[in-house]
Amino acid sequence: MKTRTLKKDKVNIITLGCSKNMVDSEILSGQLIANELDVVHESAKKDHNIVIINTCGFIEKAKEESIETILHNVELKRQGRLDKVYVTGCLSERYKNNLEEEIPEVDAYFGTMELPMILKQFEADYKAELIGERLLSTPQHYAYMKISEGCNRTCSFCAIPLMRGMHVSRTIESLVDEAKRLVQRGVKEVLLIAQELTYYGLDIYKKRELPKLLHALADVQGLEWIRLHYAYPSKFPMEIIDAIKDRPNICNYLDMPLQHASNNMLKAMKRQITREEMEDLVGTIRQRIPEICLRTTLIAGFPGETRDDVEELKNFLQRMRFDRVGIFTYSHEEGTSAHELTDNISAEEKEERAQEIMEAQQEISLEKNQEKIGKTFKVLIDKKESGRYLGRTEFDSVEVDNEVIINSKIKLNVGEFVQVKITKAYDYDIEGEVVD
């Protein structure tokens, strides 16, 4: 009888956390495949014998999920169902020594910048010529593109610089080359991601060059949508808005995490901006592009947050009327400057405040969706589910925003664009029918 070790190794990569982690896993997959290894991403077939877990260490809930995933796979190894378990990513970068002590059954731990070290475990070589080549874990019609690594900001709540280091931009040429390769593979939309988009270029070009990058990417033939995620509001370069306005394949969409609206909280969070400045910025952006979709992310329960701060945030949302809002509860992270503050709000109270804030936004979201009824939008078909097609407009990003529900007797293809007239509106989705 053949033993397990006589079979060819098959590697399953499990990705936890954000889209930036997903890109790292895709790059790792591409390198392993180039070294003739059999690789899958989050396979449910259970026919692999090696697991690489790409962990998240951003907030407490993410860390708990990462630990649970590690323990689950260590147990599978103990049962003889896996030969090797490797751990990489943010949690491993931040707590490597602790993890090695607490979960020694893992075969090796790696930091966020140790891709060549992972490859050595497989007697594989890092192939520099493969930069930009990766095994997409997304549907083939869209892909995330990470334009930089790390962050130079000093937000008091954020541990990202501890795990990802200082800001390092990729060159415009390498990003344009990657975009061209992605288009050749069928990608129609790229979602630009970084810890902080607006800082792009300051390290290698000595000035903010995101607008220049946007124009270069917009010139790539076949790239129909370019979407911007994670733009820092302080000292925001308005040339970004000019690029969005001037180039039709840059989506009228901007993800700008503001975190709070109370000046007391913004100061404590070290956000380098006031509520008044944020209101002016939002007003200026909407004045230049009235139809733009603005998404923001907020934090509930930061140390010292009062009921007045919560009410101020709710009033801010009512005035600003953001199209999309996400919210996190504050996580007390070691190594951040906020860790010196007293985490004086219970987990239950944090959740209640987050829910209260989202309820205020829910009404705004419904009203904005109702305004779309009767209008026709260009929609990208993402998938077919339960007999219906699900897609997105240029105002909706993957997973975090609205979906367009389409009931169509005509067969639609995933990855194609269709014109859809909106007939119904819900809190966080819209519904419509295909029109010629």
Image: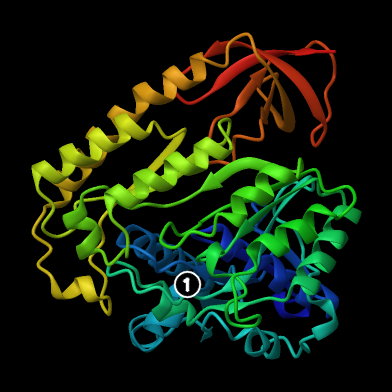
User: Where's residue 192, x and y in %?
Assistant: 64, 57
Residue 324 image point, x, y percent: 46, 36
The residue at which mark 1 appears reads as 74
Query: On the picture, is 216 further left or further right than 48?
Result: right
- What residue is at 59 percent from the left and 67 percent from the top? 81
Would residue 311 be found to the left or right of residue 152 on screen? left
Q: Residue at x 36, y 65 (%)?
A: 63
Q: Decide: few, some or many residues near mark 1? Use Cα within 10 Å; few <14, some 14-19, many ≥20.
A: many
Q: Is residue 133 above or below residue 384?
A: below
Q: Is residue 111 visible?
A: yes
Given residues 311 and 216, the one toward you in this image is 216
- Residue ID at (43%, 56%): 233
Residue 187 position (above or below residue 86): above
Q: Quadrant of the C terminus?
A: top right
Point 59% across, 41% down: residue: 253
Q: Nearer the viewer, residue 40 or 44?
A: 40
| Secondary structure of the residue carrying numbered label 1 | helix
Give the image quarter of residue 341.
bottom left
Q: Amino acid type of disc 1? A: Val
